[in-house]
Image (cartoon, rainbow, N blue to C red):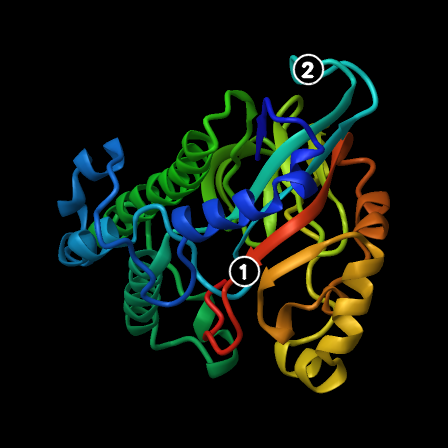
Amino acid sequence: MTVLDMPVSAIRGEEGLLRNVLKRETRFGIGAEFKQKRDHRVMDEDWSVSPITRLNKDRAWKQLGTSGSGNHFVEFGTLTLDRDDLDLKAGVYFALLSHSGSRGTGGSVAQHYSRLAMRLHPELPRELVHLAWFDMDSDAGQEYWAAMHLMGHYAAANHALIHRSIARSLKARVLLDIENHHNFAWKEKHFGKDVIVHRKGATPASEGVLGIVPGSMASPGYVCRGKGNAESMNSAAHGAGRAMSRKAAKNSYTWNEALKLLRKRDVVLISAGLDEVPMAYKDIDRVMAAQQDLVEIVARFDPKLVKMAPAGERPED
């Protein structure tokens, strides 16, 4: 999330400009890339840590600064602070929120090592095969760990470039910037043991750590501060989460219903698939109420101008 020194009135008063900036500075979907490569120091890291990252470096560079499909988004909205915090005064601010990832290269890394782990554990029954693992002392384990961390840096670079490019295009000054990993693994100490914590659909929530919990295109997202709850292994939900599958959403709702709700919430949608309609997601406020012991809410983000991958793109969450 990025807070910019632009008036909130610009969201509607300069909507045409904001649309053009999103069109120019973002790309969505499988294989999305920029004709002219974007630069970030992540491309100077060691991409030879794995044969998969080495093979995919050029593709990763072409896709640098882009978003996938599925639940990936870039949106303008308002950030409301009820009290002074985050080095900002209480008030309502112009903000940019996005969700991207490690793109096709990250997917290739995950797929390659998942298949390798399954081959190394033929003793697992079919229902447990996707829980195959690597020993961290093995060559494969060390290689995967290095590749995963490189993909984490690459995902963070995509977020940084999206936000930096949009801010530059708007000639706006950045007042606040927050980025947090999710769907990742960390070496941590819990219950007196050194462990690896996999946070799938979750985000770190150690004491004082800032995180972002998005809702849907028509519901708020929240900036939160972790409480360091030991029993949750310092974790909290990363987002509202889906209430139904993509297929069920397509079979259950129409664009007329979705657009009616969006108008009611004062949200303008530039593009998205029917499987991402807000009714397909859980109630974010109920989700936040259920994790009061994990995080405290610091600020609320309300989406106003939303762009996602157009309909027809294969999901790439």
* Type of the residue with mark 1: Met
- Above or below, comparing residue 155 to residue 169 in the picture: below
Position of 129 with respect to 119 (left or right) is right
* Residue density around tag 1, few if under 14, some if 14–19, many if 20 or more, within 10 Å: many
Q: Residue at x 16, y 53 (%)?
A: 58
Give how far across and how far down residue 92 sits, in percent: 76, 27
Q: Quadrant of residue 234?
A: top right
Position of 298 with respect to 71 (left or right) is right
Residue at disc 1, secondary structure: strand
Q: Nearer the viewer, residue 231 or 66?
A: 66
- Above or below, comparing residue 94 to residue 239 in the picture: above
Give how far across and how far down residue 109 sits, in percent: 29, 59
Q: Residue at x 84, y 47 (%)?
A: 290
Tell me the tag on residue 88: 2
Give how far across and how far down residue 259 sits, in percent: 75, 68
Whether residue 233 can be seen here: no
Tell me the tag on residue 308: 1
Q: Residue at x 73, y 80 (%)?
A: 254
Q: Nearer the viewer, residue 130 or 202?
A: 202
- Above or below, comparing residue 139 to residue 257 in the picture: above
- Residue farthest toward the bottom in the current orientation of the protein: 251
